[in-house]
Image (cartoon, grey):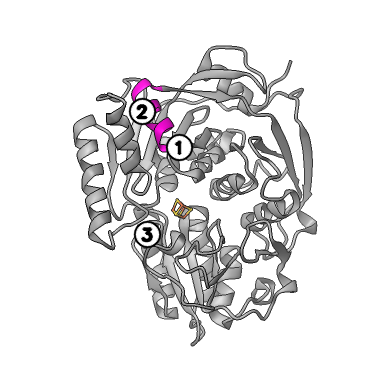
Amino acid sequence: MGKTLAEKILSNKSGVDAVAGDIVIANVDLAFMQDTTGPLTVNQFYEAGFSKIAATTKSAVFLDHAAPSPNSNLSNDHLTLRGFTDDTGTILSEVGDGVCHQIVAESLAKPGDLIVGADSHTVTAGGLGTFACGMGSTDVAVALSLGKSWFRVPESIKVSINGEFPLGVHAKDVILYLIGLIGADGATYRALEFGGNTIPPLSISSRLTIANMAVEAGAKAGLFPADELTLEYISRRGDEQQYQTLYPDNDAIYEQVIEIDLSELEPTISRPHTVDNTVPINEIVGTNIHQVVIGTCTNGRLEDLEVVASILHGKKQHPKTRLIVAPASRGILLAAIEKGYIQTFIEAGASILPPGCGPCLGMHQGVLADGENCLSTANRNFKGRMGNPNAFIYLGSPASAAVAAVTGEITDPREFL
Ligand code: SF4
């Protein structure tokens, strides 16, 4: 019987011929934590009596959510996490290096890997053909020490994306459209597996954006095949090991197949306060925007910043709108400086934040005031997500965010192209 990508990876990592519904114990290639979930993970690790990381598993700690730290409690958490990396030989990604999921994609994830992270958007690495999923701190602590974890092999939903992107429509619009279509619980504990004739030429950056938000439909994983483009990306990272392409079998069994015809897609926006509350942008043009945020693990990559720079070049942010840009990693920031994008943003009036999560989770660096509206390229717009339950968060593509920064209101980006 043919296998889906999830079945293939979990079979390989568990050493059994697994199908959807089976429970397997599988070897974990990478287990990681970040600075808000890390302290509990470390605590659980030591409380369970563990002292060493499994020899077969890579481990990493990312200081990215509160980076640089805004208060002494979080600084002390950073201290604890640095101590853990010293004691265990865990990789430390320091303040300013970038968002965990971007660094994992840039340097750690490989096709066919099994990754667990104490962060729900660990699914991002699925853009590289990796089975990657978020887990609670205790489960990650166990995976760190034992090098394995248990999984129920998920049923898979195939999302077949076909056609070419219309002008002004981007990967973010595709995933927002899909989540609006199936709902926040439309893929609960399923693997969303992406295919169709749009995928072979789809950039890795776009794949990561789509995989990143699979969890917003409840999915356990969001998986792209590892194709020639994936292998090229991995070899550009300087990885000398040879990897194989990884595709689902032609006769793999899917619980459901969803077809998306790109020619019918429009720029899409999620309205407050749920991600699945989506509309085509022309239904809410004119909504005042007080703050625009460009960045995060969803849309803080160079390709995103390029789109933003092309719109902002020679323009200024609206006098009543603040523009915040947070590149997703140090490497992206450097490349954006080299290409002149950062100069364009600064000349447009933007505040540039150090690589990291920035204001995405409402800890610092751009908390909204009561009644304010924000258009963000992030992945969540729950009430209070950006630090104020009396504020309103809209989600959109980097293009939609950039034009709103200029006009001060939600605006169809196609008018600017
Ligand atoms: Fe979470 Fe936002 Fe950081 Fe991504 S950028 S890991 S969604 S806080």
Question: Residue 118: percent from the left, percent from the top?
Answer: 43, 40
Residue at coordinates 52% horizontally, 68% vertically from top-left?
Answer: 308
Return the residue nearer the eye: 231 or 143: 143
Residue at coordinates 36% horizontally, 52% vertically from top-left?
Answer: 98
Question: Residue 416: percent from the left, percent from the top?
Answer: 64, 76
CB under 8 Å between callouts 2 and 3?
A: no
Whichever of callouts 1 and 2 sits on the residue coming sooner in the sequence is 1
Front position among marks 1 and 2: 1
Front position among marks 1 and 3: 1
The residue singled out by tag 3 in the image is: 333
What's the CA distance linking mark 1 and mark 3? 31 Å
Decide if ligand 1 comes within 8 Å of the CB at mark 3: no
Relative height, residue 266 to residue 259 (above, below): below
Q: Which residues are magenta?
A: 137-147
User: Quick one: quadrant of the C terminus?
Assistant: bottom right
Q: Residue 280 lies in what quarter of the image? A: bottom right
Please state which amino acid type lies under the numbered disc 2.
Answer: Leu
At label 3, counting other C-alpha atoms closer than 10 Å, the crowd grade (few under 14, some 14-19, many 20 or more) is many
Whichever of callouts 2 and 3 sits on the residue coming sooner in the sequence is 2
The residue singled out by tag 2 in the image is: 144
Q: Let me know if residue 62 is in the magenta part.
A: no
Magenta highlight: main SS: helix
Front position among marks 2 and 3: 2
Decide if ligand 1 comes within 8 Å of the CB at mark 1: no
**Residue farthest bottom in this picture:** 319
The residue singled out by tag 1 in the image is: 136
Drawn side of residue 157 relative to residue 121, left or right: right
At label 2, counting other C-alpha atoms closer than 10 Å, the crowd grade (few under 14, some 14-19, many 20 or more) is many
